[in-house]
Image (spheres, coloured by chain):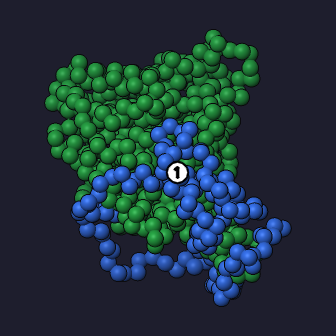
Amino acid sequence: MLGRTLREVSAALKQGQVSPTELCQRCLSLIKKTKFLNAYITVSEEVALKQAEESEKRYKKGLSLGDLDGIPVAVKDNFSTAGIETTCASNMLKGYVPPYNATVVQKLLDQGALLMGKTNLDEFAMGSGSTDGIFGPVKNPWSYSKQYREKRKQKSHGENEDSDWLITGGSSGGSAAAVSAFTCFAALGSDTGGSTRNPAAHCGVVGLKPSYGLVSRHGLIPLVNSMDVPGILTRCVDDAAIVLGILAGHDPKDSTTIQDPVKPFTLPSLTDVSKLCIGIPKEYLTPELSSEVRSLWSKAANLFESEGAKVIEVSLPHTSYSIVCYHVLCTSEVASNMARFDGLEYGHRCDTDVSTEAMYAATRREGFNDVVRERILSGNFFLLKENYENYFVKAQKVRRLIARDFVNVFNSGVDVLLTPTTLSEAVPHTEFIREDNRTRSAQDDIFTQAVNMAGLPAVSVPMALSSQRLPIGLQFIGRAFCDQQLLTVAKWFEKRVQFPVIQLQELMDDCSSIFENEKLASVSLK
Amino acid sequence: MWARAVWLGLRASAGGRRGFPSKAAHQGSRRVTAELIEHLERLALVDFGSQEAVARLEKAIAFADRLRAVDTDGVEPMESVLEDRCLYLRSDNVVEGNCAEELLQNSHRVVEEYFVAPPGNISWPKLDEKEPFSHR
């Protein structure tokens, strides 16, 4: 049951084949079994069980709220959840219990979803590995998969199996791991520079970044106001579309959400791609790209072409400056956003009481880790009077050029762009930490951050396993507010590539029946 | 607390990384003086904490310097991707509130309905006057 799609489980719930409480308990038990992954910071067991009970009552009366009623979901710990600790994996907010729900969380709850818990991340969502939070790093479930383990045994040196575990990517690594390990059916992440798509690619799940302005940011603890977007992680594209349909729409509490009416949609099953034009940005073919990812990218392009789509090479000329521009704008906005953490109204407060400024400084020194402090300081540098024009305003101008590049490409008849999501498959933690956070982010965000600067929708879809048997995902980028079209193409692709299911049998003794070919009584969908 | 010595040029840290030009890095090193460090720490009210952190700032500046190569003549800065639309403004009606108690609960120091701050008229000490932070 845990391996099914959202729609299948929803149907099973409606038909009484499984109850919300059973589903909830199985997920909770799996969360306990996979605790070593460190995907969850807070597991909201009591809350989830209570929600399950209420969902069950609704199903018994035949009054389910919709496709998400009774479905376990997880939320990244930088979304405010009323009554449930929200830490952003930082000492600054440890113990902070928000008095309100983020709009996207509220929408999920209003649909009857069961909140399993808050997932782990890089501190304040700054990072590309989910390794820099105070609760420790998140481990990629694929490190423990049968596929990866068997491959490693072939060249094993008899070393300790766990010492070389792989990172999930970041910063929504906890959410990606939670979905990948079947502990929930969907998870919320946030995406500022690729933070949803990067871990999705490394963990073999679907990571959707909606268009900027489509989904409310109210309650999402902000990093970069002009680029942040709540992200959606699921095991298949259809599920992502269902969740997007629920989350999208104007929110009076977030004035950066567009007012155009938005309706939930069902993705058509595209069979004819002959009218589709796929663009391949040539500047994305960088020397750092691993040969495996490059060959899968090529294979994907050929797949579209062989099925009749038009596949053309396009140019995004300012690509090489995109990551630099992102770096300046991101640190500048961060410097401003992090100013709210002063210890007075919420969050950590130091013991010093000499003066306001001394108190702020000590509080912030104790509350923030190195990564956060460095970004704040860098941001402040770029915002200094003498630097403002040359760095911040310059970066804003370059941002326009980058956004324009995309507009030009889409105006030339391209429907969707196809690019890699990451440079390579997930790397071992020991290798990842050899470089500092900023360097890693600059390397790993290379294909993903331009999308945030242009505010476009993008989705990472797992394509195939590498020679190490680790997931590699590819990214599709769509036109602004054409999320439905983007997901339609992604769904077509997903069906063609048939990405394998992760085999975690060895860990799930008594849950093994979930993963073997279940002979479920046929579940009729609608 | 690290000693704030004068830097004698940047470590060639940028040179070995892929894609980072070392030429720009040298331009950066001249900019990061002790005064700048103090100024930034004061503005941000966070501290660098170590010499490595300062070196990383220099790398960050060097990285940002690459933007100079882009021709942005006649290009307007872009503040938001939604610049062609109007921001939504709610009508100025009170529809929620009266949650003072809930909000005050999150603070460490509260007196009746006030958040309590230490005195605000004592300025942040200058570099030479400063005591190292006392940890309890």
Chain B tint as drawn: blue
Q: Element type at marker 1? A: helix
Q: Hey, which residue is sitting farthest front in the picture? A: B8
- Residue under the image location 40 percent in, 40 percent down: A447
State which chain is coloured green.
A
State the image coordinates of residue A122 (x, y, percent, origin top left).
59, 48
Residue at mark 1: B25
Instruction: Please name whichever residue, A260 or A184, is drawn nearer the observer in this view of the structure.
Output: A260
Q: Is residue A352 above or below residue A75?
A: below
State the image coordinates of residue A280 (x, y, percent, origin top left).
28, 32
Judged left or right of residue A357, residue A280 is left
- Residue under the image location 67 percent in, 71 percent down: A361
State the image coordinates of residue A276 (x, y, percent, origin top left).
19, 31
- Let me know if residue A7 appears in the view: no
Instruction: Please name whichever residue, A193 or A115, is drawn nearer the observer in this view of the structure.
Output: A193
Q: Chain of mark 1?
A: B
- Count of picture labels: 1
Q: Hey, which residue is sitting farthest bottom in the picture? A: B121
* Number of residues whose C-alpha sits closer than 10 Å to that of mark 1, classed few (under 14), some (14–19) or many (20 or more): many
Residue A217 falls in image quadrant: bottom left
Which image quarter is the C terminus of chain A in? top left
Q: Is residue A504 above or below residue B95?
A: above
Q: Is residue A141 above or below residue A403?
A: above
